[in-house]
Amino acid sequence: MKFITLISAALASLPSAVSAQSVFAHFILGNAGSYTETQWQSDIKLAKAAGIDAFVLNIAPPLAGTTSIQVANAFKAANDLGSDFKLFFSFDYLGGGEPWAAYDVITLLKTYAPNTAHFKYQGLPLVSTFEGTNNIGDWAWIRASVPGGIFFVPDWSSLGPGGITSELGTIDGAFSWDLWSTGATDMTDDADKAWKTALGSKAYMMGVSPWFFTNLPGYNKAWVWRGDDLWHKRWQQVLDVKPAFVEIVTWNDYGESHYIGPIYDDGIPRAPSANAHPYVDNMPHDGWRAMLPYYIAQYKNGGVAPAITVEKVSYWYRLTAASAGSTGGVTGNNCPSAINLGGYQQCADPNAVVQDKVFFTALVSSPATIVVQIGAGAPVSFQATKAGTNHFSTPFNGQVGFVKISIVRNGATILSSTGAAIQSQPASGVTNYNAWVGSASSQSY
């Protein structure tokens, strides 16, 4: 009877309508097994400089061992920095071979929810998940067992917006993992709007991701989804949807190629049948962080553009034409194949999903000309007609060589950057569908 009373009281006290503007980055704790406190502090400083408010620590069971050690290291690093950068948990119910036991979730939250480095909303510790729909029944007990309760925003994307409506009594909001388009199409925010409508007054946490490519046969994963213009366009969709929170996917998931943090060698999957080094090594993504302070400030300011004191360019592309090498078993979409056991989408040609282009975004304080040159090819000019971000792309058109990009105004070069060379074919014979990302600014970034 006491247990039932606790649950009833907890459900009755669920927070109501929310209004928040915080940005988080999904962090795969399993890729930080050898992190030191110094490494944690380095990543925290980089994330904070980009405007990110917290790392969402994706953790899979068991609670003991490396997970326990690195959670402690992360919180110590955040505490020792004394900054307002925070951490909170995304309990991964699919990544550990078994779901989380409710008592382990309770133990972790009781330990870290009171910590000053734990992110809180409306005075409550924010808690999320990666799936876990078979354990929905655990959360009333978990909520009742954590002193003061929790602000619960799970990712139960498999339920869809229609299915989440039956769980509104359990949650304070929801996060959708629907972050990439299907096939040779661009991502829209239609699904985000459906989620937000289904949640009503509860919080919607919208996901933003720049890319997706994986080729890890040992994990039954080898597919590509369209990235291309996604990083810039998704932030414009954030302004349209106006979610309570934004979660960037990810800081450090190297195996799926959507990392925006620095490459950490020990965090890259390296098992013989699941080796991501061939497509991650020497493929930095730090340049995607260049625009984040602007994107995030604009989101937090309700769409009002912040003042521009530093002009920047961020640019990205693959290092060969898609058809220059073999697919290596990679499919377009997560569809049934010899590698993608359990794939659920219709197969597409991976070389049709991606576009052979250089994509670039210029942040300028006033109109300017953006000049792009591939190798010895003729320079191509684009007009940035407004202050703020201006996004473009230009096709390879068979050109190879280093990619040079410049911002020019009134005949003067404001900034210039040269990126990795586009090759006629991949050295391994297998196409790398990952992106090389660069950036430059009118002062050091």
Image (cartoon, helix red, strand yellow):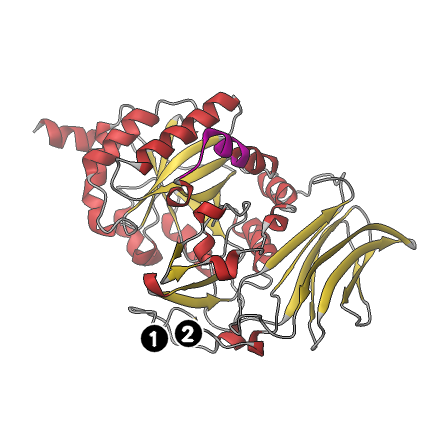
Up-down: is 175 above or below 104? below
Secondary structure, mark 1, is: loop
What residue lies at 85% left-to-right and 54% top-to-bottom?
A: 408
Task: Kindly identify the amino acid type of the residue bearing the numbered disc 1.
Answer: Ser
Q: Which residue is mark 2?
A: 329
Pick the residue in front: 265 or 414. Answer: 265
Magenta residue check for 39 = yes
Q: Which residues are magenta?
A: 34-43
Task: Give x and y (percent) for residue 199.
Answer: 37, 48
Q: Which amino acid type is shown beneath numbered disc 2?
A: Gly
The relative height of residue 248 versus residue 341 in the rendered view (above or below) is above
Element under label 2? loop
Give how far across and how far down residue 40 sits, in percent: 48, 33
Q: Residues within 10 Å of mark 2 (few under 14, many from 20)?
A: some
Q: Are marks 2 and 1 in contact (CB under 8 Å)?
A: yes
Q: Does the magenta segment cover residue 138? A: no
- Circle 1 crowding by C-alpha within 10 Å: few under 14, some 14–19, many from 20: some
Residue at image mark 1: 337
261 or 428: nearer the eye?
428
The spot of residue 206 in percent (x, y) is 46, 49
Q: Earlier in the sequence, mark 2 or mark 1?
A: 2
